[in-house]
Structures are given as C-alpha cells and as structure tokens.
Amino acid sequence: MNNNKLENWEEKVLNNYLDGTQLKKIPASRKKRLVVLRWLVRKFEEKVTYSERQVNEIISQHHSDYATLRREMIGYQLMEREKGFYWRLPAVLWKSENEIK
C-alpha cells in the first residue's frame, strides 16, 4: 500500500472503532488493533515517564479495559515499562505489524 492509501485505510479503521474519543471496542484483527493502539499511544507525551496509575487514567478516558490496552501497547512495543513506570517510545522506533512477535 502506498502512503496515501495506508493513511486513508488507517483513517477508515479509526472511524469504525472510535466514537469521538471513545474506543467502541478493541479490534480483533492485529493490523487494525495496531492502528488503534498507535492512535491511543499518541495520548501520551514523548519523554515523559508515567506511573501505572497515570497510564490507567489516560487510557480509561478512551476505553474501560485499560489493563488490556496498556499490556497491548507494551506488547506492540509502542511503550516501555520498568519498575512500574511507563514511557512512550518515539514513533520512529515503532515496529510494523510484521516485525512484532
């Protein structure tokens, strides 16, 4: 997919799964889930360290299952965690769907 088509597809995915800033449901498809998680992780500032409670509060503004979404952002390597603290990785380090194990 070229960049324009990819952006249009991602926008379509977000339109299907979001109601304003509320995530209606977590996509089952890994590809669509990654689009939603990238949208969600942008709610966190770069170079800021968050406690688990702060992460939960930010995620819960968009969906009630903050624990699953928090784990997914770690699993998809959009955020990192150490000793109960979390931080967003820079977008240039985000892996594509094919690179995630």
Image: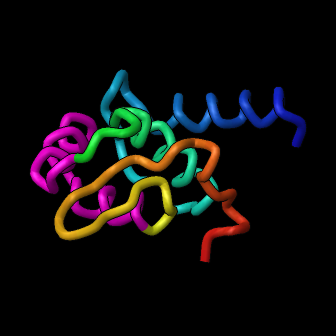
Quadrant of residue 72 in the image?
bottom left
Quarter placement of the N terminus = top right
Identify the residue at image location x=60%, y=77%.
Answer: 101
Q: Nearer the viewer, residue 9 or 95?
A: 95
Magenta stretch, main secondary structure class? helix
Identify the residue at image location x=34%, y=36%.
Answer: 44
| Residue, far front | 47
Residue 94 location in percent, x, y?
59, 52
Query: Does the magenta segment cover residue 66?
Result: yes
Q: Is residue 33 above or below residue 24?
A: below
Query: Does the magenta segment cover residue 26?
Result: no
Q: Is residue 39 above or below residue 87?
A: above
Q: Nearer the viewer, residue 2 or 22?
A: 2
Q: Which residues are magenta?
A: 50-74
Q: Is residue 95 left or right of residue 76?
A: right
| Residue, far left | 53
Q: Is residue 55 left or right of residue 78?
A: left
Residue 86 location in percent, x, y?
28, 55
Identify the residue at image location x=53%, y=28%.
Answer: 15
Q: Nearer the viewer, residue 4 or 24?
A: 4
Residue 10 location in percent, x, y?
65, 36
Identify the residue at image location x=21%, y=38%.
Answer: 58
Q: Is residue 55 left or right of residue 71?
A: left
How was the colour assigned to the protein in this rendering? rainbow
Residue 100 location in percent, x, y?
62, 70
